[in-house]
């Protein structure tokens, strides 16, 4: 039986929500991953040291005894002071910038991407070596939103050459090409964007559990992402953007954006890399690249997987919360054998 080991798997873009949903989904990541970068777009967003430390405590409580480290982030604001960021820098791994209204709980994001408007906080971040994580989309036509954001990434990279900028959940060929153009640009890519195109979402019957933002793109975009991931591009990291919503908010008019992949992410990644005979690159993509880019040492956690079919549950539930995973009720080729 074929076996594969992953050491210190890291999810560098994760939504855990709060309250009962947090208690439901957090263990689905902490069971297998050594750490994850946690998004701050709660209601209200995480913008103070008190709210950040409190959220971290709630995450750790939800994860129980799992060997897992939540990497915390702040929600970007234009008016953070040097004193505040210097005091909190050791508690965070980065600051997440959302254009206002562009995705879930981003109403308090920045209303202008003008460099001078952003400069006060970004200059402090550069000086303190705090990475900037960006949801890179405009308010344009949905298929072009990321492409239209590329000049903004270029402006940021040029204006703040000492600022480490992470292009979050990239979905286009253009974004992959931009990685090699600027030394201070890096990126995460999700599992679902390595697997699906817009055809999978809406080419036949609409599949609400594949609806996400940024929306899945064209075949040539998926090919570019897949090529970069399979070859462990040194500036690319795995970030699931696993985003849970209750079933009733997905299977409805006004479907919420988000794909829930946390419970099956490692199994499906092994299946994908095995299919293309690139398993030797998986540990770099899912762990080593992130440690180098963010400059930290992950805790040791070895996950052993075997090539044995696993039936994905139809739904995960806790009290009054529930969430449907990607590939619900389908079989995937790999199973988790042990976690040490």
Image (cartoon, rainbow, N blue to C red):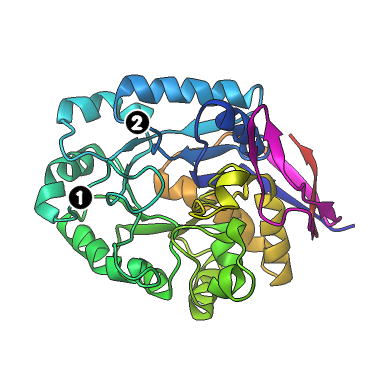
Q: Residue at x 35, y 40 (%)?
A: 94
Query: In the visual, does 227 lie left or right of 88?
Result: right
Residue marked by disc 2: 44
Residue marked by disc 1: 111
Q: Residue at x 18, y 54 (%)?
A: 160
Residue 84 position in % (x across, y down):
21, 26
| Neighbours of disc 2 within 10 Å: few (<14), some (14-19), many (20+) | few
Query: In the visual, does 309 lie left or right of 125?
Result: right
Residue 49 position in % (x across, y down):
31, 22
Residue 153 position in % (x across, y down):
26, 62
Residue 232 position in % (x across, y down):
54, 63
Q: Residue at x 48, y 72 (%)?
A: 217
Query: In the visual, does 245 lie left or right of 73?
Result: right
Q: Earlier in the sequence, mark 2 or mark 1?
A: 2
The answer to whether residue 89 is seen in the rendering is yes
Camera-nearest residue between 158 and 79 = 79
Q: Residue at x 70, y 39 (%)?
A: 316
What's the distance in space between the residues labelled 2 and 1, CA to CA?
17 Å
Magenta segment: 302-331
């Amino acid at each position: 039986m074929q076996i594969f080991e992953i050491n210190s798997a890291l999810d560098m873009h994760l939504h855990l929500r709060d309250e009962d949903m947090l208690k439901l989904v957090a263990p689905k990541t902490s069971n297998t991953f050594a750490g994850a970068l946690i998004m701050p777009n709660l209601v209200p967003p995480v913008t103070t040291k008190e709210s950040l430390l409190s959220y971290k405590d709630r995450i750790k409580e939800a994860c129980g005894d799992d060997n897992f480290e939540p990497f915390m982030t702040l929600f970007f604001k234009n008016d953070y002071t040097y004193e505040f960021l210097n005091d909190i820098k050791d508690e965070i791994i980065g600051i997440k910038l959302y254009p206002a209204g562009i995705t879930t709980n981003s109403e308090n994001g920045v209303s202008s991407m003008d460099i001078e408007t952003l400069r006060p906080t970004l200059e402090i971040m550069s000086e303190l070596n705090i990475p900037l994580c960006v949801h890179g989309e405009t308010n344009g036509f949905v298929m072009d939103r990321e492409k239209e954001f590329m000049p903004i990434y270029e402006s940021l990279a040029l204006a703040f050459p000492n600022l480490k900028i992470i292009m979050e959940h990239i979905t286009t060929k253009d974004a992959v090409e931009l990685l090699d153009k600027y030394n201070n640009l890096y990126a995460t890519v999700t599992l679902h964007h390595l697997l699906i195109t817009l055809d999978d979402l809406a080419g036949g019957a609409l599949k609400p559990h594949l609806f996400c933002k940024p929306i899945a793109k064209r075949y040539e975009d998926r090919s570019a992402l897949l090529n970069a991931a399979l070859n462990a591009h040194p500036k690319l990291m795995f970030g699931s953007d696993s985003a849970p919503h209750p079933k009733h908010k997905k299977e409805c008019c006004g479907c919420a954006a988000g794909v829930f992949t946390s419970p099956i992410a490692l199994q499906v990644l092994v299946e994908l890399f095995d299919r293309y005979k690139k398993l030797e690159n998986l540990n770099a993509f899912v762990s080593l690249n992130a440690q180098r880019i963010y400059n930290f040492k992950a805790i040791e956690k070895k996950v052993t997987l075997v090539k044995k079919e696993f039936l994905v549950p139809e739904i995960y539930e806790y009290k009054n919360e529930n969430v449907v995973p990607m590939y619900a009720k389908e079989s995937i080729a790999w199973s988790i054998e042990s976690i040490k």
